[in-house]
């Protein structure tokens, strides 16, 4: 059984989990709420980031459906190699092996899927600020957040709707933040689907 302190959730930790297949969140296909959102996107030139993407099934789905301006980021190299093995023509330059907080590229859309919940909760304000910084005007942060009490155990680390509202409200227009109606069965009743839109610049 893996045991590691929250401040040790580093590249070595995540690579070890992928290499030993200790990835209970891995379902092998795009999660339904995000797939449903992707299916509603009409502009296939939109510049998309999937941070902490893991094995990148959402990225694979996007790519196979004509979205080519996709960037996949993970602090661990193993899942990026896994994605590349499944999608050989995915550009190496769009596979970002790095710390999310070191990223310095802007995007139209960021898809959040089990990245936020994998971070040390102390980093959540920094996450919100970084997302705001890397999104262009009216750029969107879209995805899922776990809806269960935040405890010392994790990852995944949970939270509540009110906590998320307070965290993002100063930086984004919270357009949607509600219980997901089409979560996969193991996560049913435990996820919030959200759409946050950046409206203006704020001073750091």
Image (cartoon, helix red, strand yellow):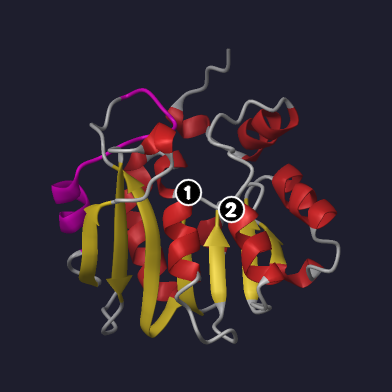
79 over 60 or under it: above or below: above
| Screen quadrant of the N terminus | top right
What residue sits 48% from the left and 78% below the top? Answer: 41
Q: CA distance from mark 1 to mark 2?
A: 7 Å
Q: Position of residue 110 (x, y in %)?
A: 47, 68
What segment carries the magenta color? 152-168
First in sequence, mark 1 or 2: give its number: 2
Q: Which residue is mark 1?
A: 115
Q: Secondary structure at mark 2?
A: loop
Name the mark on residue 53: 2
65 over 16 or under it: above or below: below
Q: 21 or 106: which is nearer to us?
A: 21
What residue sits 58% from the left and 84% below the top? Answer: 44
Name the mark on residue 176: none
Q: Position of residue 33 (x, y in %)?
A: 41, 56
Residue 43 is one of the magenta-drawn residues: no
């Amino acid at each position: 059984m893996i045991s590691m302190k929250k401040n040790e959730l580093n590249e070595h930790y995540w690579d070890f989990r992928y290499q030993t297949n200790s990835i209970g969140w891995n379902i092998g296909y795009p999660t339904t709420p995000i797939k449903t959102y992707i299916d509603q996107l009409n502009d296939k030139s939109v510049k998309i980031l999937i941070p902490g993407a893991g094995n990148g099934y959402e990225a694979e789905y996007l790519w196979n459906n004509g979205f080519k301006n996709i960037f996949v980021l993970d602090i661990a190299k193993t899942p990026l190699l896994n994605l590349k093995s499944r999608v050989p023509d995915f550009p190496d330059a769009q596979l970002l092996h790095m710390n999310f907080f070191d990223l310095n590229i802007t995007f139209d859309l960021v898809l959040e899927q089990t990245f936020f919940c994998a971070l040390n909760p102390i980093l959540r304000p920094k996450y919100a600020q970084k997302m705001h910084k890397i999104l262009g005007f009216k750029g969107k942060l879209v995805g899922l957040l776990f809806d269960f009490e935040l405890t010392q155990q994790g990852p995944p680390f949970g939270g509540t709707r009110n906590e998320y509202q307070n965290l993002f409200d100063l930086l984004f227009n919270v357009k949607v933040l509600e219980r997901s109606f089409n979560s996969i069965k193991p996560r049913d009743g435990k996820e919030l689907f959200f759409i946050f839109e950046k409206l203006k610049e704020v001073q750091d």
